[in-house]
Image (tube, helix red, strand yellow):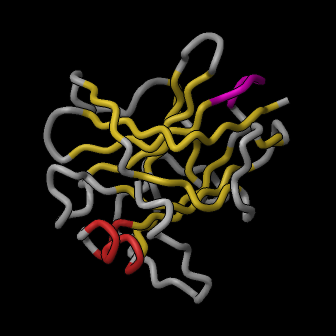
Amino acid sequence: MCSAGCTRTEAPIKTNSSVETGNTGASGVSTLEPSAPEGAPEAVASVGSCNIDVLNDQAPTVTPRLLPPKGQLRLEGWAVDESNPGNPPGQLFIVLQEVVSGSLWHARVSARVPRPDVTKAMGSSLMSGFRTGFDISNLPSGEYRVLVAFWQDSPLKMCDAGRRVRVE
């Protein structure tokens, strides 16, 4: 959804970093935690109202992006709760799901950004965009689905925009 009507803004983007960032390491970068996001509703719904436009400063590709085992993962994109598009999701996370085992790792999104393109295309809140980065040094080798997870109430909404990364 919104792939044709939403385009990434190249101009500097003002962020709202008042969103709680979760665990951060010495570098100030969020770290991944094993498991689903704490406090998430048990009910899960698959939705298609998100996108990851930028993965480690490049446009995502169909093939998994190779990441160094002691590096960082930086993402930019957007998420809209179609049941309440006027409000950005109160809880917003990136979830990495290992393809073979299904194990989950998560990190809270660190900054919200305005996305007028998404607002125009989907009638959503201006602050539907996000920019986040986190340390992957504790992530085991493997291939991972990169998911956007959010909720305001129940259920937990998991959005798969088709992004994959591989840690070797």
Quadrant where the C terminus sits is top right
Horizontal and vertical percent for residue 37? 38, 33
Outermost top residue? 101
Image side of residue 115 versus residue 166, left or right: left
Based on the picture, tell me whether residue 143 belongs to the magenta stretch.
yes
145 relative position to 138: left or right? left
Question: Residue 136: x and y, percent?
Answer: 69, 40
Residue at 72% across, 58% down: 56
Give how far across and how far down residue 149 sits, in percent. Answer: 38, 41
Quadrant of residue 42 within the rendered picture: top left
Q: Residue furthest bottom?
A: 11
Residue located 43% across and 74% down the image: 113
Tell me where residue 26 appears, x and y as whole percent.
64, 54
User: Quick check: is 84 in the magenta stretch?
Assistant: no
Relative to 161, is 126 on the left or the right? Answer: left
- Asked whether 130 or 122 is in front, the reply is 122
Which range is magenta?
139-144
